[in-house]
Image: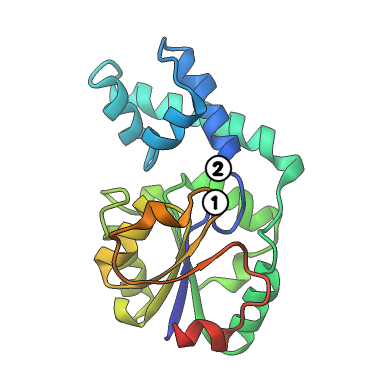
Amino acid sequence: MRAVIFDMDGTMIDNMMVHHRAWQKKLSEFGLIMSLEEVMEKVHGINEEILERLFGDRFTPDERRQISREKEAAYREIFKPELRLVDGLNELLEELSASGITLAVASAAPPENVDFVLDNLSLRSYFSTVLHSKSVEKGKPHPEIYLKTAEQLGVDPTECIVFEDSPVGATAASRAGCRVAVITTTHAAEEFTGISNIRAFITDFSGLTGEIIKSW
């Protein structure tokens, strides 16, 4: 193992329910009423792709970008008072960084949300590479973001461990050839059936060490 790559939403921070509620409210403004369960099932990936998938050509690209900005601004306002890392992650980042393991973020979130987390929690210095929704053409489950992250790190994807919380994200990492560790903040282990390269399931990062991760 030469690199550890972290998804952000639901992995580094337990924020997915806030996203789901923000999406539920925004979609209802356009007449699309969805339960939280439906939002959890159908709303994933890059915002503009989500809106195109749900509404077809109802909105222009500029309108989709504006709706996305409004939704994300609402999310950040709601979540900022509760912003914190998942248990054990700060200690793990310190250990991995001190031991010379290269670290990266590969998130489907827009850059404003990635900056919101990294800057408010003073995490940016840990990561050699940070990719977000604007860094790629195709969102997860396409493997582009993980292939591009590995390329920027100068390592083979097979030398990377990826932490992910969703089946879509785990599929992207697996398709890229990375080994995957799933954190079950938002999805149960049985939802990942059939996805290859999954080496571990964790509930948080407490007690994790570089040696444990290398053994995966």
Q: Residue at x 34, y 81 (%)?
A: 154
Q: Amino acid at mark 1?
A: Gly
Task: Provide the residue designation for mark 2.
Answer: 16
The quarter of the picture where the C terminus appears is bottom left
- Do labels 1 and 2 touch, CB within 8 Å? yes
Quadrant assignment, res 54? top left
Specify few, some or many for label 2: CA neighbours under 10 Å numbering under 14, 14-19, or 20 or more: some
Residue 96 rendering spot, x and y as whole percentages: 59, 82
Q: Which mark is residue 105?
A: none
Q: 61 or 49: nearer the eye?
A: 49
Looking at marks 1 and 2 on the same chain, the residue that comes earlier in the sequence is marked by: 1
Q: CA distance from mark 1 to mark 2?
A: 6 Å
Q: Amino acid at mark 2?
A: Met
Residue 100, placed above or below residue 55: below
Residue 21, placed above or below residue 32: below
Residue 172, placed above or below residue 116: below
Residue 174, placed above or below residue 214: above
Q: Residue at x 28, y 27 (%)?
A: 52
Q: Residue at x 40, y 36 (%)?
A: 41
Q: Which mark is residue 10?
A: 1
Tell me how many marks there are: 2
Residue 17 rendering spot, x and y as whole percentages: 58, 38
The quarter of the picture where the N terminus appears is bottom left
**In the image, farthest residue toward the front:** 190
Q: Is residue 46 left or right of residue 215?
A: left
Residue 190 rendering spot, x and y as whole percentages: 41, 55
Residue 164 rendering spot, x and y as whole percentages: 46, 60
Q: Secondary structure at mark 1?
A: loop
Q: Residue at x 55, y 42 (%)?
A: 16
Q: Secondary structure at mark 2?
A: helix
**In the image, farthest residue toward the top:** 31
